[in-house]
Image: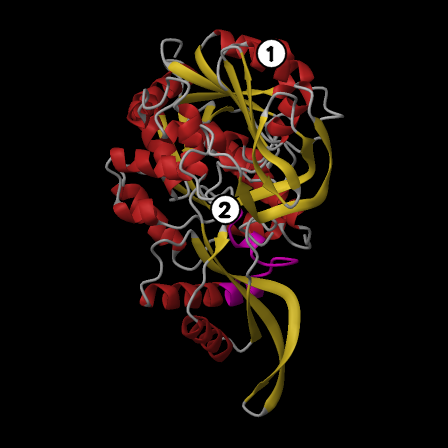
Amino acid sequence: MASRPSVLVVDFGGQYAHLIARRLRGLGVFSVLASASWGLRGVEGEASGLDLRGIVLSGGPASVWEAGHDGIAEWAIGMGVPVLGICYGHQLLAKVLGGRVGRAPRGEFGPTTVEVLDEDVILRGAPPRIRVWMSHNDAVLEAPPGSRVLARSPGSPVAAFEYRLGGTVVHGVQWHPEVTHSEYGLELLRNWASQTGALGTWSPGDIVGELVDHVRREVPPGERAVAAVSGGVDSTVAAVIASKALGDRLTPVFIDHGLHPEGEVERALRLLRASGLDPVVVDASREFLEALRGVRDPEEKRRVVGRLYGEVLAREARRLGARYLVQGTIYPDVIESGARPGADVIKTHHNVGGLPRDLGLNVVEPLRWLYKDEVRVIASRLGLPRELLEKQPVPGPGLAVRVEGEVTPEKLRILRRADRIVREVIESHGLQRGLWQYFAVLTASKATGVKGDRRSYGYVVAVRVVESREAMTANIAKLPWSVLEEIASRITGEIPEVTRVVYDITPKPPATIEWE
């Protein structure tokens, strides 16, 4: 790695910190992360092993007046390579360079229009106004002395700036160019990376061999491992990678927890076998439903599912004589579970924060630092079925997080029928391509309706359909009204227990993709 021109992304605990590295890797720039929680010495140590060509300071939830990160920003500026600050990083650079940071004239969250004042290096070719993704309460109110203001917005008097000190060029932007919702975002990152000399020097095609080697290093010779597989692309790719590394020392395990959408178990097993895996199938559906009895809090449901999932896996691993567990954890799971230092817990994923710590298994996660679109590229390189690549994600806890309140057999029956209708209608119109997920949610609300000229009182079903590339952000799919009407008509007509259907139009953020 040291021989590759590299960019270091310093992670201040922001939700999109790893996405910055992901975008740079997509531009052919080898990028690694260092957590600011390691302190200056830890960040310096990570940088020392690299052919360092640039540094990015990420966003984060803290205030620059509270977090004590000035030393990291000063170190970055003193390294003599291009520096880019994003959101919190932008404010931190401005502060240490002598600018004024304080409460924004108004907070900006979500789509915001930025006025480009100067087509500097990073904004070269940008139109006069761009719609970008903001998420901040503080702002740079006055630029550092000697710098140039490149852009502004209603809540950010200095939305972007450039500062030159000898051969060092420092840029800061208040918005998040790394998210797909920011216009001109990728161009901005490409423009910045062009200064580093690292642009186009790395190919993601190298990664398959590295992942296989990673598993070989993690699982010693003679040891056996189990791979937790669900039939989704993440766990399947992780298991195929592990199979290449371990051969017959790996046993894939599929746990039927009784919380799958209709037909998902059969489809998952078919795709696993088509991918060259022959999983052991464990039917633990009764155990999971019993464990969820009376549980209403969504985080507790995730913990219950995660804990029991781990126990069943550990039990099966002991039976097979395995001491290692391979999982398809990807980075959005890690971020939302607060598994990175400094990150907030958005929700506990069953395969990250939900697993018991005393499983007695050594966990191997070859995909931990990757996004789903990257995993899909790897799946394609591995020659896995196209159906697997295009398959929409199913949450690890299954329908437990799509049933508000307590999970019961009756609610699961109703939800499976509603979910099947959503899928059938969308796919019958050929709308599934380009959609990230489309599913039904059985809410805890009930509403009055009229069926057959008689009063009816039944469940409210919410339909959620989103577009995304990496699951860190998501837009609502603008389905034709005729399609939504067909979905609502079929659900209320075919499911007696449902009287009303609503369409969730909340993007991520502020919502998550899953309901709970």
Left or right of residue 381, residue 8 in this image: right
The x and y percentages for residue 285 are: 51, 51
Residue under numbered circle 2: 129
Q: Up-down: is 83 above or below 422? A: above
- The residue under the point 62% across, 9% down is 41
Frontmost residue, 161 versus 102: 161
The x and y percentages for residue 363 are: 49, 25
In the image, residue 413 lies in the stretch drawn in magenta: yes
Q: CA distance from mark 2 to mark 1?
A: 33 Å
The x and y percentages for residue 194 are: 38, 23
Query: Which part of the image, by quadrant, shows the N terminus?
Result: top left
Span colored in magenta:
396-415
- Disc tally is 2
Frontmost residue, 167 versus 26: 167
In the image, residue 7 lies in the stretch drawn in magenta: no
Q: Up-down: is 85 above or below 511? A: above
Please, what secondary structure does the residue beneath circle 2 have?
strand
The kind of residue tagged 1 is Trp
Residue under numbered circle 1: 75
Frontmost residue, 400 versus 339: 339
